[in-house]
C-alpha cells in the first residue's frame, strides 16, 4: 500500500472518530454553533482554509 493511501486511510479514520465525538456531544448538549465550528477550524488549520469548509453560509 502506498504512503499516500495509508495517510488517506489514517486521515479518514481520524475524521470518522471526530464525527462520532461531535455527534455524541451534540446528542448530549446542543448542535455546535457556526462560531464554535469556525473556532475549531482555526485551531486545527490556522489561517489556511479548512479542507472541508462548508459553503452553506455563502448564500
Image (tube, rainbow, N blue to C red):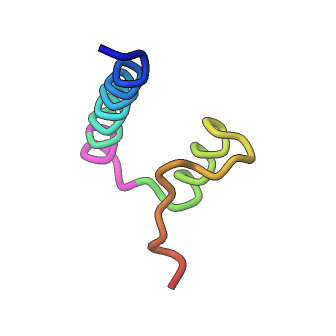
Residue drawn at x 74%, y 47% as measured from the top left: 47
Residue 11 horizontal side relative to residue 51, left or right: left
Number of numbered discs: 0
Residue 18 vs residue 58: left or right?
A: left
Question: Can you tell which quarter of the image residue 44 is in?
Answer: top right
Q: Nearer the viewer, residue 40 or 51?
A: 51
Give the vertical position of 23 relative to 33 (above or below): above
Q: Is residue 53 left or right of residue 49?
A: left
Q: Residue furthest bottom?
A: 59
In magenta segment, residue 30: yes
Magenta span: predominant SS is helix
Q: Nearer the viewer, residue 24 or 12?
A: 12
Residue sitting at the far right: 47
Q: Residue at x 43, y 53 (%)?
A: 32
Residue 40 inside the magenta-drawn segment: no
Q: Quadrant of the N terminus?
A: top left
What segment is highlighted magenta in the picture? 24-31
The location of residue 2, given as percent across then percent down, is 36, 16
Image spot of residue 54 (x, y percent): 47, 63
| Looking at the image, residue 5 lies above or below residue 38 | above
Q: Residue furthest front?
A: 2
Residue drawn at x 64%, y 39% is: 45
- Find residue 5 and report its horizontal and vertical position in percent: 35, 24
Report the residue at 33% width, 31% height from top: 12
Above-or-below relation of 42 to 21: below
Q: Is residue 4 above or below residue 18?
A: above
Q: x, y (%) of residue 21?
A: 33, 33
Amino acid at each position: 500500500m502506498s504512503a499516500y493511501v495509508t495517510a488517506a486511510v489514517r486521515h479518514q479514520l481520524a475524521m470518522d472518530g471526530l464525527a462520532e465525538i461531535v455527534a455524541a456531544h451534540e446528542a448530549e448538549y446542543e448542535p455546535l454553533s457556526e462560531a464554535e465550528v469556525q473556532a475549531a477550524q482555526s485551531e486545527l488549520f490556522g489561517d489556511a482554509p479548512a479542507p472541508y469548509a462548508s459553503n452553506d453560509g455563502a448564500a
